[in-house]
Amino acid sequence: MRKICLIIASLLAPIAVGAAPNPEMIVVCYPGGAVNAKDANGAMNSMLRVVERVGQWQANSFNSIFITKPDECRKQMVEKNPKFAITSLGLYLELRSQHNLVPVVQPRIKGRTSERYRVMVQKDKYKSLDELKGKTLGGTVLEEPAFIGRIVFAGKYDPASFFVLKPSNQAIRALRALDKGELDAVILNEQQFGALGSLHREKPLEAVFESAEIPLMGVVANSAATTAEERARFGKALEGMCTDAEGKKLCELFGVESFVNVDAAVFEPMVKLWTEGK
């Protein structure tokens, strides 16, 4: 999720052809991340130069704010009322009605625009998720327990009451604690799970839970503040990012193959799960 947020955040550009007197503010929400604002803004600026050229927008015509805390993101979405934003799937589901949010583009990573979440334990220590009742669960995604409960666990488990939650801003730190026996389990997203092979461990791990496919979240727009034409143009510019000579290098750096326009129907099952969980 960290790489996805950084690259998408870097791709945002204003809709106006010329530089606006007051640059549009883009709210970038990355809950649970260890990325500091300086690093994030540096990545955004370098990527933005390419997108402005690809989309034929004047340079330096937008601004952004990078946030890692859900409460602060909610606050900034109200204060800034942005036309475009980058949010986690959980925040999109929570805020979509209040801010008229619609998905614009998704990243494609390793041929996929969806991911699975897994709960990892030391091999042979636990056989099912039910055996983890009252046990410690770590992970970076625990900043959004409602999302984990309603979407990842499909409403079958309430993380806050079922586990003893131990949120972390670094997956590697949680996994090391699991390896040492300091945590009973760790929940990972797809990118984190894919990186397990590069982590030295004393004890083998296994998954006692694997979620259904969950769509990757990318850029969203306020449908009341943007036109269909603006959203289409914005999406087309992002699609062109990874086919540009310079943009392709940056996409490869972040492991993103391309950006694709979103079929809103992809998110309907998620909206249904979220609504049923209220």
Image (cartoon, rainbow, N blue to C red):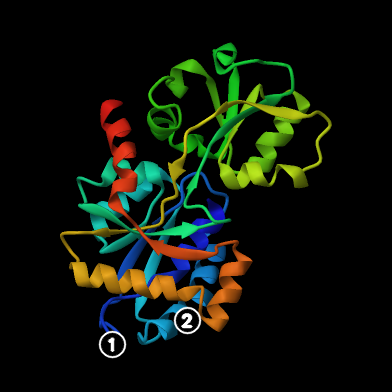
Residue linked to disc 2 = 49
Instruction: Look at the image and tell me in which quarter the C terminus lies.
Output: top left
Residue at screen point 58% across, 56% down: 110
**Mark before the other along the chain sequence, 1 or 2:** 1
Note whether residue 12 is visible: yes
Residue 99 vs residue 38: left or right? left
Amino acid type at image mark 1: Gly
Q: Which mark is residue 18?
A: 1
| Residue depicted at x 28% and y 85% | 17
Image spot of residue 229 (x, y percent): 21, 72
Could you say which is closer to the camera, residue 160 or residue 244?
Answer: 244
Front residue of 107/201: it is 107
Badge 2 marks a residue whose secondary structure is helix
Residue 123 in which image quadrant: top right
Please indicate, yes or no, whether residue 278 appears anywhere in the rendered image. no
Instruction: Answer with left or right where residue 22 lies relative to residue 46.
Output: left
Q: Which residue is at 39% across, 67% downward?
A: 64
The residue most toward the right is 202
Q: Position of residue 273 (x, y in %)?
A: 32, 31
